[in-house]
Image (cartoon, rainbow, N blue to C red):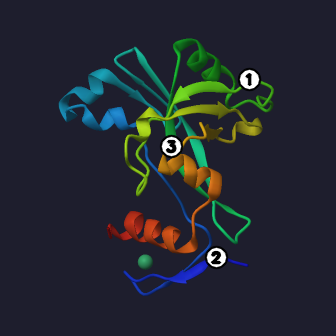
Amino acid sequence: MEFEFQCSCCDEIHKGIPSFGTFAPIHYFSIPEEEIEKRVFLTSDTCVIDDEHFFVRGCLEIPVVGYDEKYVFGAWVSLSKANFDLFEKVFDQKESDHIDPMFGWFSSWVWPFYEDSTNIKSRIHLRNDGVRPFIELEPTTHPLALAQKNGITKDILIEIYEYYMHGKK
Ligand SMILES: [Zn+2]
């Protein structure tokens, strides 16, 4: 079954499971604009803040009830310096899925699953051919962890779509 729905914001029929993401870890957004250039090193996949906080971007994959394809949110996870260095060395190589999963603190807000999601422990699993790693959340009762475990309904995904595409809350 293909995922499709009529958007209540623009009335168009949207097809396919959407994916969204955030271009930087949550910590980035609390840095005053005039300090960003000096304190932040940011690429599409990695971020270093003040030379002491290390983050990588991965895919948070959330099942959608009744569909095979998952909802993917591009989110950030903090890593130790040692793991960050290893990540930079191997993540875009042909084979990197043999690397042990890396521990990291989840470092993004994912609407509508706010509620201190930066306190969730997670593990980053590297994938081959430069595919962004997938993020496994620690199975707790946090709403985001429950969403990853149990999936979300089509209705929730439509709300997510309307929020990220049209700013509807
Ligand atoms: Zn729309």
Depth check: 160 or 152 in front?
A: 152
Residue at x-position 69% and y-position 24%: 90
Return the x and y of residue 143 as percentages of the image width and height.
Answer: 48, 51
The kind of secondary structure element at disc 1 is loop
Please state the quadrant of the image where ligand 1 appears.
Answer: bottom left
The kind of secondary structure element at disc 3 is strand
In 3D space, how far apart are the residues under numbered discs 3 and 2 (Cα atoms)? Answer: 23 Å
The residue that label 1 is drawn on is: 100
Say which mark, if any, is on residue 3. 2
- The tag earlier along the polypeptide, 2 or 1, is 2
Depth check: 120 or 130 in front?
A: 120
Return the x and y of residue 123 as percentages of the image width and height.
Answer: 62, 31
Say which mark, if any, is on residue 154. none
Q: Are marks 2 and 1 in contact (CB under 8 Å)?
A: no
Left-right relation of 109 to 89: left
Say which mark, if any, is on residue 75. 3
- The tag earlier along the polypeptide, 3 or 2, is 2
Q: Are marks 3 and 1 in contact (CB under 8 Å)?
A: no
Residue at x-position 56% and y-position 65%: 18
- The tag earlier along the polypeptide, 3 or 1, is 3
Residue at x-position 32% and y-position 66%: 167
